[in-house]
Image (tube, rainbow, N blue to C red):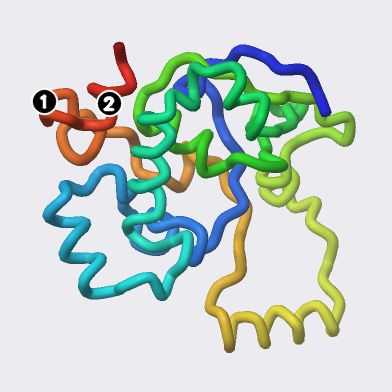
Amino acid sequence: MGLFQKVDPTKQVYCFRLSGYDCYAVRTGQCSLDLTDEQASIVSAREGNKFRDGSVGKCRELAESLINANYYTDQNKLSAMPMQASMGSCGHVSFIDGQHRACIAKRLGINETMVDLEDNDSGVCSACFASKGQKQRRTYLVNKVMALYKKYFGEPPHTFLDVDYLPPVTEKTGLHSPNKEGSLKSKSIK
């Protein structure tokens, strides 16, 4: 474990490893936190929970429970269930645990929380490592396993930087709209 450090999630660049079964935005190109309750309800009725963590309601429910429990500001709760990450030499934060919680904090505009952050002694984050063409050539067996995974489960999780892939945070719609009564953003900024 590293040291608990105060961070501003809105100013960090995160390296995530997510698939469409982990993240609604990866699967659809739109963050579920940007949807109105009505839009989310329509999607939920159509899809159900077949995408598990990538379902439309997953991050919406998690965000609401974290905000209602004061997770991001309560030191005891942060210590009991810490977001664990490492800071690469590239300046990007990669998660060991808590990438959904960190993403939610950033999307909701929470500008201060604690993260168990350690230095990545091995260098850059995995997204930078992959983008620089330093990925090792896959063997025949790995290619076969990946093909089977895709056949039965769809695209495997992939590594990306949030600023490159996820839609930008918007203040106009969804759960974190400052104009929406009872929005998560209005609850989180007290």
Q: Is 50 drawn above or below residue 131 in the view shown?
A: below
2 or 1: tag closer to the N-terminus = 1
The residue under the point 12% across, 54% down is 38
Q: Is residue 188 left or right of residue 138?
A: left
- Point out residue 133 in the picture as x, y percentages from the top left corner: 74, 52
Q: What residue type is labelled 2?
A: Lys
Q: What element carries label 2?
A: helix
Q: Is 27 drawn above or below residue 59 in the view shown?
A: below
Q: Which of 9 and 135 is in front in this view?
A: 9
Q: Are marks 2 and 1 in contact (CB under 8 Å)?
A: no
Q: In which quarter of the image is the C terminus?
A: top left
The residue under the point 52% across, 18% down is 74
Distance from disc 2 to disc 1, alpha carbons, whole Å, reads: 9 Å
Q: Is 49 drawn above or below residue 36 in the view shown?
A: below
Q: Which amino acid does label 1 sit on?
A: Asn
The residue under the point 70% across, 79% down is 146
Q: Which of 86 and 64 is in front in this view?
A: 64
Q: Is mark 1 on a helix, strand or loop?
A: loop
Mark 1 = which residue?
Answer: 179
- Point out residue 96 in the picture as x, y percentages from the top left corner: 72, 42
The residue under the point 43% across, 23% down is 70
Q: Is residue 24 left or right of residue 173?
A: right
Mark 2 = which residue?
Answer: 185
Q: Count the marks: how many?
A: 2
- Point out residue 33 in the picture as x, y percentages from the top left corner: 30, 43
Q: Callout 2: few (<14), some (14-19), or many (20+) C-alpha neighbours within 10 Å?
A: many
Q: Quadrant of the N terminus?
A: top right
Q: Is 89 drawn above or below residue 161 in the view shown?
A: above
Q: Callout 1: few (<14), some (14-19), or many (20+) C-alpha neighbours within 10 Å?
A: some
State the image quarter where residue 176 is shown.
top left
